[in-house]
Amino acid sequence: MAIILSIETSSSVCSAAIHKNGKLLQVKELHIPQSAASQLVIQIDEIFNITGISKNDIDAVCVSGGPGSYTGIRIGVATAKGLCYGWDVPLITIDSLVILAAAVNEKITTELLCPMIDARRMEVYCSLLDQSLNITEDTQAKIIDESSFGNILSNKTISFFGDGAAKCKTVITHSNAVFLDNIFLSAANMGKISYDKFLNKQFEDLTLFEPNYLKEFVAKTKLK
């Protein structure tokens, strides 16, 4: 048996969940950008109160390892590491795009899945996976234009989804392209993957693990 706390903060949705043997017990989601710093720990406490589970029951902590929001990922990973140190439990990480794909893989009929996280302008973080969530094209930061995925779409159907997909809908117009609405990142969808990793002891080194930011952080400058 494994009770795992999951944390997902790589997008505008801040969420935390508890799974038991891969099955969701409770999730808290907050659809407010940049809320992780002030709300993540509160969400975790609320989940413990609702389920009656305590920190002593937790067997591992799982966190999204990027890509996505630089600040959100940093907060999520730092929180997860701190809890693992304090509770003396292992750390599990999942690629943010795989978490996004896990939300839809049982609902689609296309041959490939393309989760997309908005990276501003016409750039997205994306990857390609099959229906078993095996990665067929590695995670990358990709600038989208009319030719994007054209060579693959000529032979296979692809479902595009996530907060980066909406802006691509008018650009990627191939008949084999399917766009799914209202699919977002959530800790609720981390259960099965984190449980499989737990059983296989696929744990991260708490000292050495670094998230996959894909791009360096660029601070915004205020207009005078």
Image (tube, rainbow, N blue to C red):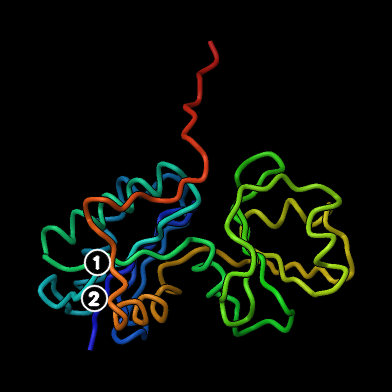
Seen in the image, is 3 located left or right of residue 30?
Answer: left
Across and down, in percent, residue 117 comes to 59, 54
Q: SS for tag 1?
A: helix
Cα–Cα gap, marks 1 and 2: 6 Å
Check disc 2: other Cα within 10 Å, few if <14, some if 14-19, many if 20+.
few
Residue 199 place in picture, x, y as percent: 30, 83
**Residue 7 in which image quadrant:** bottom left
- The kind of residue tagged 1 is Glu
Q: Residue at x 60, y 44 (%)?
A: 119
Judge by depth and name the residue closer to the eye, 130 or 186.
130
**Toward which corner of the image does residue 84 lie, by quadrant?**
bottom left
Q: Residue drawn at (57%, 75%), measured in percent from left and top?
A: 134
Q: Residue furthest top?
A: 224
At horizontal 32% and vertical 47% (from top left) the residue drawn is 75
Name the residue at 19% across, 72% down: 49
Q: Position of residue 112 (x, y in %)?
A: 70, 74
Report which residue position mark 2 lands on.
50
Asked whether, in this view, residue 145 is left or right of residue 106, the answer is right
- Residue 46 has which mark? 1
Q: Are marks 1 and 2 in contact (CB under 8 Å)?
A: yes
Q: Residues within 10 Å of mark 1 (few under 14, many from 20)?
A: some
Residue 208, how many percent across, how many down?
Answer: 27, 51
Vertical arrangement, residue 151 with respect to residue 34, above or below? below
Residue 87 relative to residue 141: left or right: left
Q: Secondary structure at mark 2?
A: helix
